[in-house]
Every structure is written in C-alpha cells, then in structure tokens.
Image: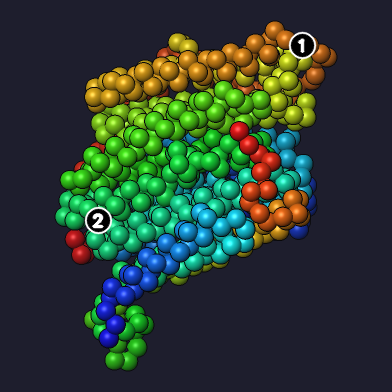
Amino acid sequence: MNGQYAALIIALPLVSAFFVPVIKAISKKAVMPFLLLVTLAQVGIAGWVFNEVYTSDKPIIVMAGGWRPPVGINLYIGHFAALFVLIIAVISFFMAYFSIKAVKVEPLDKYAMLFLLLMLGATGMIATGDIFNLFVFMEITAITAYALTAYNKTGEAAEASMKYMILGGIGSSFFLIGIALIYGATGTLNMAQIAQLAGNINPTVAQVGLALLIFGLAVEAELFPLNAWAPDAYQAAPHPITVMFSAFVVKAGLYAAARLLYLMQAVSTWHSVLRLLVIMAVLTVVVAEFSALRQRDVKRMIAYSSISQVGMIAFALALGSQAGVDAGVFHMVNHAIVKALLFLGVGYVGIKLGGTTLEDFEGLGRRMPLTAFAITVGSLSAVGIPLFNIFWSKVRIMLAGVSAGYTWGVALILGASVVEAVYYLRLIHRIWFAGGGERLSESFALGAIMLFLVALILVIGFYPNYAWSLAQKAGADIFDVTRYVSNVPLMGVGA
Amino acid sequence: MIHISVYYFGAISLILIGLYAVLVKKNLLKMLIGLSIMETGVNLLLISVGYISGRSAPILSEGVGPNQAVDPIPQALVLTAIVIGVATTAMALSVAIILYEKYGTLNVEEIRRLRG
C-alpha cells in the first residue's frame, strides 16, 4: 500500500471532528458511538503505519500536495512517531469508551469534537516535519486542551483553564519568537533542512532560538517554571481527559522538545541548552515530588507524580547521549501505560463514589476489588518496584545518567522513588487496610481495559527486552540526525 | 526610508510591555490584553524578519516581480498566527465570563480555590 495513505492519521480525526455536528443532527445518541468508531478506525490506521514502519525499517514521508520539502510541508513518521501514534490511538479508543460512562455534562457533541481535535493535535505534533506546522499542531492541542479543561463548567475548572491559557499564551509567544530567530538565521522551516544548516548559524542566535523553542514547549511538556497549570488542570478536567493529558499530550510536548534539541546538535553552543534542560528537569522532579507528598486529593497527587516522572523523562532526554534518549523513550512508553491505568482507576472511583479524596479510597479493596487491584499494580509500578515496567526504565535512566557524567542523577531518581514510595504506599494502605463498605458492581468493559493495561505492565516487567528494543529504535530515530536528514527527500533549493 | 532596527525595537518593546502586563497586573482582562499585545509584538517581529529594505508587499502584480517583493513566508506565518491568536483570545474571554459568574470578581488574587 502506498505510504502516502499514512496522511490519514491526521486526516481522519480532522474530518471526523467536523462531521460530529452532522451526526448530532441525525441522532444525538449516535455522537458517542461515532467517537468510539472513529478512534477504533484510528487504531487500525496507526497499527498499519506501525507495522509498515517497523517491518520496512524505513520512515514514511508524507508530502502534502505532492510537493517535495522544503517547498511542501512533510510529515515524518519514523520509528518514534509510528510507536507513539499507535499509543495515542489505543489510549484515545479506551478513553472514548470511558467517556461514555464518565462524561454526563452536556453538550456531548462539542466534547466529542474537542476530543478528536486533541487526539489530532498530539498526533500531528509527533508526526510533523516542519517547525511552523509543529506550532500549529501545538496550538490545536493547546486550545482544545484549554476548552476541555473548562468543560465541567465549575469555578475550579474555569480557574484551571485560565491558568493554563495564560501560561500557554506566554509559551506560544516564546515559541514563535524562537521560530522567527531560526527562520531568520536559516531561511527555512523544514526540520531536516534546519538540521543541515544548523552548523552555519551564528551560535548565539541558535542558542537563544533553541532555548526559546524549548521554553515554549515546556508548557505542554510540563517542565518546571511553566507547569503550574498542570495539577489544577488534571484535577479539574473530566476524568478521560486527564488520562489523555498524562498519557500523550505531555509526551507530544516532550518529543517535540527533544526532536528540536537533537536537530541542532551541530551548533557549538548546544551543550549549554542541554544544561538548561537538565536544570529544568531536575527542578521539575524535586518540586513535584514534594508537592505530591502534601496532597489530600488522590487525582491531584497522581498528577504531581506524573509531572515528576515527566521531569525524569526530560532529564534522560537532555543527557545528550544515545543511551539517554533510548531510556527517555522507554520511560515515556511505560509512563503512558502506568498513568493511563492510574488515572483511569482513580477516575472510575471518582464517578462511582463521587470524590477522589484520600478518604474516598478507604476500604476500596472491599468495595471495588478490581479497580483497587488495578490502582495497586499501577502504584507499585510507578514507584519502581522490580518486575514492574517502570523499574526497568528507571534503571536505564540511571545507567545513562552515570555514563553521561551525571552521577548525582542516580541520587535524584532514587530519592524521588523513595518519596513516591511514601505517598503511593500510603494510598495502598488506605485502599486495603482501612475502612470498608458494601461491594459495588464494576463495569465489565472498563475492568477489561484495566486488566489489559495491568497485563502490559507485567509483561514489560517480566520480559523488558522487546519493549526496550522498540524504545531503542525510536530513540535512534530522535538521536540519529544524519539519518533523519537523509530520509527526507529535500529539493536542492536555498540549501 | 525607516531603518529596519525600528521594527525590531518596536516588536521587542511590544513583547516586553505585554509580558509585563501578564505578569504584574491583577485584573484578568488586563492580563489577557497583555497577552494580545505580546502576540502582536511577536507577529511584528516575524514580519520584520522577512523585511527587505525598499521592496514592496509580496503580491504578484504589474511591476512587482519576485525580486521586488519581500519574503512572503513570514507573512503567511503571521496570518496563521493571527488566526490562532484570535481563537485563543475568544476562548480566554469566554472562560473569563464563566469565572466572573462563579467568583463574582476578575481579580486573580481572589480566584484561588485550587491550591497546593
């Protein structure tokens, strides 16, 4: 099959999103099944793209309108993008089902539309090969995320959304200034061509431009000075949306930051930007872990935990070595699975019991045993207990940190794990050893989704080699810029 | 003939004025106005990056060939950025309306139910 069909991963959600009003006009009840159907189709397309890229071992380059880059905008679906587009699609499919149970606030058709556009934005950020196109997809993600955060129409939701918007607005302005600098210096917006020309740019301009781009992406990637919105938005957003934020929206931001970072390897001042990112990442981990300790609301606590894990990923990506990028990608995959499971479980408890404070979780082991089991496995994995998946990626990050000369990185990750152990074990203790109550019936399909994610955690935990080899290929896709450039069929204009 | 640095100076001043308003002002609407000013500054910066002294707008017409026009790409970018800015501002103002309904104020120091 022609690789150009891979453009469907962008086209399908976009077209379907604008078909939602038509579906609503036919039958209001059909909106949510339509959403489920579209996300299922997206899983199919993403699965095909994944299979295509990994069997042929070559990226798919989609050229919009048949124009060759840099004149036309291209999509670059390499190993990383193929893997993450699949993860995005699968999680969106699960969350579309969860939304049917979890979201009761009207207007559901607007919800379905925003849901699809959020999925589209994150997919686009990961797949694009053009820096301004990246900005557009980032804004699509951001604006839909603002709207979905405020979706519940409570004061808290509006407050969280407003915080997110102010920080997002500052971030996107920084990102555009960065684009202006890079464009002014290279005369191109195509990522592969920027990588080609990076060595010739004035190092100061490149340094400032790159730092601004990363600062702009730090809002979506939830890195320290610009992540104040995240816990509020996670807490106030509808439960399925929280899962999507944590599982892939933040990953799209991290990926974009890493991609831009490694594209500019040839710049002589590159290492100072790496150091900036390391500092931001370390502060993210430290601040988030200590904030998580103080939380009484479980959803907010896991939000802080998610942010600190994101800091670890950013730390690994900022090491500037192949091993670091591989470890970061591996941790991204594991984190997506674990946080999807945790937020799904916690969200389900929130719907069933009407709240997500620590007290609500007392006796959960007796009231909702399946959900309690899923949350327990997720928590143990998040702490990094051996034989769960996150253990392996934390080990990989530590090894990469040591070989890159950041020995204290080991102390950072071990320390963070100890803090995580404290608050996750407190939660597990409440679930199994405190309180009690009537047994509630649990949804069969949601239970199946949770068990599927639990199984993934355990499989990767016992046999990490396959997932690790995927992560290595995806990591090489980010790190190996020469191959990235040679894969994009650039026209010889302006270069 | 105005020297190009005037545009850069103006753009950067607008960005800084906007940033100041966002960071310092307490009234939500003033903060949103600050964001808009900042976006305008960034757009002006993008336009000035593509400016070439003495050339005209990149519209192909009689007497204006590709060599007499300024770089068209930044102008296309700014067009997109303006549209995105409008969408963000509209979104922010509608959330501001909800905030005013729920809290009865637009002072950001009083809109603080989520903490920790």
Q: Residue B25 carries which label?
A: none
Task: Name the residue at 32% across, 70% down.
Answer: B8
Task: Name the residue at 31% across, 49% down.
Answer: A210
Residue A171 percent across, percent down from the top left: 45, 52
Q: Mark 1 highlights which residue?
A: A435
Q: Which mark is residue A205?
A: 2
Residue A378 versus residue A97: which sits nearer the camera?
A: A378
Left of A25 or right of it: where is A292? left
Q: In this view, does A299 lie above or below B62?
A: above
- Give the class, few, some or many, for how many residues have Cα within 10 Å of label 1's Cα (few <14, many ≥20): some
- Quarter of the image where one finds residue A333: top left
Q: Which chain carries label 2?
A: A
Q: Is residue B81 above or below residue A271?
A: below
Q: Is residue A68 above or below residue A450?
A: below
Q: Which chain carries label 1?
A: A
Q: Can residue A201 be seen in this view?
A: yes
Residue A443 percent across, percent down from the top left: 74, 25
User: SS class of the residue under badge 2?
Assistant: helix
Left of B72 or right of it: where is A226? right
Choose the circle earlier in sequence order: 1 or 2.
2
- Quarter of the image where one finds residue B54: bottom left
Mark 1 vs mark 2: same chain? yes
Residue A118 versus residue A278: which sits nearer the camera?
A: A278
Q: In this view, does B39 lie above or below A253?
A: below
In the image, farthest residue toward the bottom: B62
